[in-house]
Image (spheres, rainbow, N blue to C red):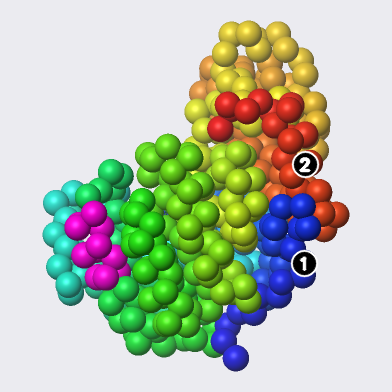
């Protein structure tokens, strides 16, 4: 049976985008979906009740961080990640494949796994595919990710090729190590750098392993957006139609729309929550830096078209004041707003797919939002 089931509801006649439902042990997710990131078992500044109020259906958390602190054994003792953090809807955990490469120092990659030093205290650790799965099994998320190597950009062909085959061997080891297939679905991750033949080879080999879902990794790592879209054009259509597709680390409005149009169902990114804490918000007319002096006496909401708690109750002038005074409520309000903005964008995307007008929707959205806003 497996832990999850993807149901393709329909394909947009205008764009080819997919509308679907993903059935998980903690409930049904409507796709395409954006997943807020809760790196350390919390979406920074938000309570689970607030996440539900803005329409979050699934959140992401990180194996690497939870292994370091507080340790997966403690989370297991607490009754698993859902109980530990009081979130009863679906959770996806990333494997640590990305964080080990982006956060830790002095890493050493061998066939067996990766040795690295903690970004917290410098202590030495070793994570193998088996270890990553053991940690993810202990955490207990509905969807868990295979342990992979996320290549840097740029990356030469020979390195990308060797790494790709190692990531495929690691994926096989992850499948063998996975103990909890009825409660947790293990997704494979497509790598291969920015090389077409390697991406195609990665898809072919990963499909043979018959994962219940597939992610496209190694993107949004500093390459131009055109290149990311090209890689999606090469890969997504080769993935099985009856399984979910997840584009890792992507969350700008333009990339969400371009990804959905290319057949992607799931996205995650720290962007909305990170820029919120810096005082930057998405609005229907593009991004706005609410800390700026020009909003000192602006008594309008962050976005006049937004239905979130922040926009229903507070002004730009007040939120700017909170940031200037270093009051925590400022970051809470901008985080609520930015996440609601992306979740509503995806609600509108799903509606547009249902009505076969996603390309029209995209045009109308960027007409107002601006084409170069990101
Ligand atoms: N998050 C963003 N990109 C990646 C990737 O390539 N691999 C993993 N494991 N996580 C990611
Ligand atoms: Zn708002």
Q: Main secondary structure of the magenta part?
A: helix
Q: Residue at x 67, y 37 (%)?
A: 337
Q: Does the stretch in magenta take in 103?
A: no
> Label 1 to label 2, Cα distance in Å?
17 Å
Please identify the quarter of the rendering in which residue 206 is found.
Answer: bottom left
Percent coordinates x, y for residue 64 in the rendering: 34, 60
Residue at the farthest bottom position: 1
Q: Helix, strand or loop at disc 1? A: strand
- Give the labeled residue for mark 1: 10
The magenta span reads 157-167
Q: Helix, strand or loop at disc 2? A: helix
Please identify the quarter of the rendering in which residue 131 is found.
Answer: bottom left
Q: Which mark is residue 361?
A: 2
Percent coordinates x, y for residue 363 in the rendering: 74, 35
Q: Residue at x 43, y 69 (%)?
A: 203
Q: Does the stretch in magenta take in 161?
A: yes
Q: Is residue 30 something one can see in this rendering?
A: no
Q: Earlier in the sequence, mark 1 or mark 2?
A: 1
Quadrant placement of the C terminus: top right
User: Where 129 sits versus 269, above or below?
Assistant: below
Q: Residue at x 72, y 67 (%)?
A: 20
């Amino acid at each position: 049976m497996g832990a999850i089931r993807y149901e393709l509801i329909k394909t947009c006649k205008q764009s080819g985008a997919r509308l679907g439902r993903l059935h998980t042990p903690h409930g049904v997710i409507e796709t395409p979906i954006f997943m807020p990131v809760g790196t350390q078992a919390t979406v920074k500044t938000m309570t689970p009740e607030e996440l539900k109020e803005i329409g979050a259906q699934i959140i992401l958390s990180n194996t690497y961080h939870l292994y370091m602190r507080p340790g997966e054994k403690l989370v297991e003792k607490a009754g698993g990640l859902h109980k530990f953090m009081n979130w009863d809807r679906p959770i996806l955990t990333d494997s640590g494949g990305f964080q080990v490469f982006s956060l830790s120092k002095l890493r050493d990659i061998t066939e067996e796994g990766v040795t690295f030093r903690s970004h917290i205290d410098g202590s030495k650790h070793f994570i193998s595919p088996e270890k990553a799965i053991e940690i993810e099994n202990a955490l207990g998320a509905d969807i868990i990710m295979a342990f992979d190597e996320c290549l840097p950009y740029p990356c030469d062909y020979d390195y990308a090729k060797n790494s790709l085959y190692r990531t495929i061997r690691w994926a096989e080891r992850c499948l063998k190590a996975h103990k909890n297939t009825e409660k947790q679905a293990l997704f494979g991750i497509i790598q291969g750098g920015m090389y077409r033949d390697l991406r195609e080879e990665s898809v072919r080999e990963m499909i043979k392993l018959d994962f219940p879902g597939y992610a496209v990794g190694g993107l949004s790592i500093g390459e131009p957006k055109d290149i990311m879209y090209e890689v999606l054009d090469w890969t997504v259509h080769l993935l099985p139609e009856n399984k979910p597709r997840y584009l890792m680390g992507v969350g700008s409005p333009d990339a969400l729309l371009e990804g959905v149009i290319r057949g992607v169902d799931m996205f995650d990114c720290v962007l909305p929550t990170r820029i919120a804490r810096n005082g930057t918000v998405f609005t229907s007319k593009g991004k706005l830096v609410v800390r700026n002096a020009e909003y000192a006496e602006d008594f309008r909401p962050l976005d006049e078209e937004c239905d979130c708690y922040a926009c229903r109750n507070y002004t730009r002038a007040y939120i700017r004041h909170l940031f200037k005074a270093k009051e925590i409520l400022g970051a809470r309000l901008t985080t609520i707003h930015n996440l609601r903005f992306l979740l509503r964008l995806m609600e509108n995307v799903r509606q547009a797919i249902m009505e076969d007008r996603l390309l029209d929707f995209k045009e109308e959205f960027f007409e107002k939002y601006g084409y170069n806003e990101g």
